[in-house]
Amino acid sequence: MWRRSFSTLPKKKWDAVVIGGGHNGLTAAAYLARGGLSVAVLERRHVIGGAAVTEEIVPGFKFSRCSYLQSLLRPCIIRELELGRHGLKLLKRSPSSFTPCLDGRYLLLGPDQDLTHSEISKFSKHDAHAYPRYEKQLERFCGFMDPLLDATPPESLQGASSFNDKLSNKMYKSAFWARCLRQAVSLGHKDMVYDFMDLLLAPASKVLNNWFESDVLKATLATDAVIGSTASVHTPGSGYVLLHHVMGETDGEKGIWSYVEGGMGSVSMAIANAAKQAGAEIFTNAEVSEILTEDSSIVKGVLLADGTRVESSAILSNATPYKTYVELVPTNVLPENFIGAIKNSDYSSATTKINLAVDKLPQFQCCNTNHSSPGPEHFGTIHIGAESMDEVHSACHDSENGLPSRRPVIEMTIPSTLDNTISPPGKHVINLFIQYTPYKPSDGNWEDPTYREAFAQRCFKLIDEYAPGFSSSIISYDMLTPPDLEREIGLTGGNIFHGAMGLDSLFLMRPVKGWSNYRSPLKGLYLCGSGVHPGGGVMGAPGRNAAHVVLQDLKKI
């Protein structure tokens, strides 16, 4: 755990200052330092990591408080920063998914193709034969998208530019679109292109209904399309988020999600170690209260909450777009239409995370077993309360009406089944990622302890329906509702992606139209968090891409 106080921050002008020690900010710092810059990372909290953090809330139990699985971290970052050497250890899960049913059946899915075929066949022979083709198609679509993740969007130049800058920008855009065209051609026949557009634009329910007939399989896959969002499976464009969550890999195996030994904070620590080795300095308990400007046109540093001034002509913010531009930049510095677009972006959230310390593993009734050691049902993501897409939609509908879902959609993971470093022997850490919970419920307030406890018990009782006695195994728990995620982690609205991942908020439109290339209207200020391309998840790409833009800009000075 990183605990260097800002009281030791040297009084000097830094080449670059990074606001926020989340994984993207740390990634940016590592690449900037490798580029020869003096870099200071200023983290508000006592611990680095942002949403990719490990904290021992209950003595002896280490929780991945927000993010809880790894797959999206870019392979180029793992390779270039040598994260394995810096302590990153990934624990593959097999099976990767378990969906229990109240009628006594269950569905296991994973990298073992024979097991997956056999499991799906219990529900539908048709679906068992269709599933490999479905996965193959998604793999091809991911192959098309993959190069875009590590590239700066081909944005038009902003402000006054030299002839050389204009020529360079035009050449980059031409090369970018030519590469995209080649990738599109690689998809093959025109039906594949139509299928790709359908995935991007259609509701996830339509896509999955076209492929499968089994309710349980469709519901299991549909949760990937809505996780972390306020969307229903029937929301147009929800298919893209499905793709976003299957485009990752673990050790070269596509679509495989893993636990991280020591919790998700180990991802951030490995990146921090790489950044430190390259020369970056990281300071905790260093809250930035304002971005300082000169003549309201260029940055000159930041002001900390205690009044300390930190000078730099390049500021990279790992905070959300709203936090950065509306709360940290002084009023009347940024163009009115730009600020309006930032304020009108969608930061809504319906996500709650509950981390539990338990004294035994849940015993699922459908498995008809009673053992203290982990079984196949315990290793992967356990889908609770989602046996059909209608149930997922119903849970979403409650939230749209201002109510926490009466039967929440719960993704349960038990990382201690593979990681013996995060809990005492014989006991376990359980993560519950829960939807849907509105930021401001109409029937109560998340600040009310009684209201919070009632919802937590609702979730535990739902799990009891599938695993009797689960509630009695709970030693203690930590609960983060949307307002908690905003207050403690700094996620505006509690949105885990720093802003919605709808089609109107991606690529050239992220964070807003005209400013997708990590720069801002304030010279020297950049965004490097999930609020810019390619978006949310523990990916690191926004930090890496932003650092490359900063290094490119500083070469021109």
Image: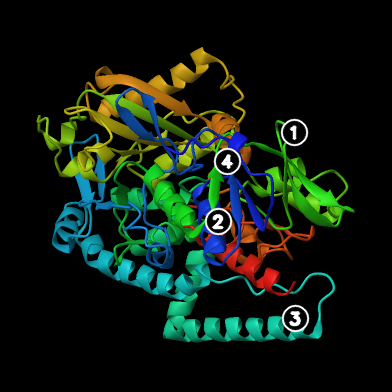
Q: Which mark's residue is nearer the viewer, 4 or 1?
A: 1
Q: How is the image coloured?
A: rainbow
Give the numbered dot on residue 29: 2
> What is the CA distance from the residue labelled 2 to the residue labelled 4?
12 Å
Estimate how packed mark 4 is, as few (under 14), some (14 to 19) or many (20 or more) residues with alpha carbons within 10 Å. Answer: many
> What is the CA distance from the residue labelled 2 to the residue labelled 1?
24 Å
> Which secondary structure, mark 4?
loop
Mark 3 or mark 4: which comes first in sequence? 4
> What is the CA distance from the residue labelled 3 to the residue labelled 2?
25 Å
Classify 63 as above or below 389.
above
Mark 4 or mark 1: which comes first in sequence? 4
Q: Quadrant of residue 127?
A: bottom left
Give the numbered dot on residue 307: 1
Amino acid residing under circle 4: Glu
> What is the CA distance from the residue labelled 4 to the residue labelled 1?
15 Å
Amino acid residing under circle 1: Gly
Q: Residue at the spot x=47%, y=66% of the render?
A: 199
With 398 as the anchor, is 167 left or right in this view? Answer: right
Quadrant where the N terminus is found in the figure: top left
Place of residue 167 in the rendered image (x, y in percent of width and height, measured from the top left): 73, 86
Classify 238 as above or below 404.
below
Q: Which mark's residue is nearer the viewer, 3 or 4?
A: 4
Are the residues tagged 2 and 1 within 8 Å (C-beta)?
Answer: no
Q: Is residue 213 visible?
A: yes
Query: Mark 4 = which residue?
Result: 43
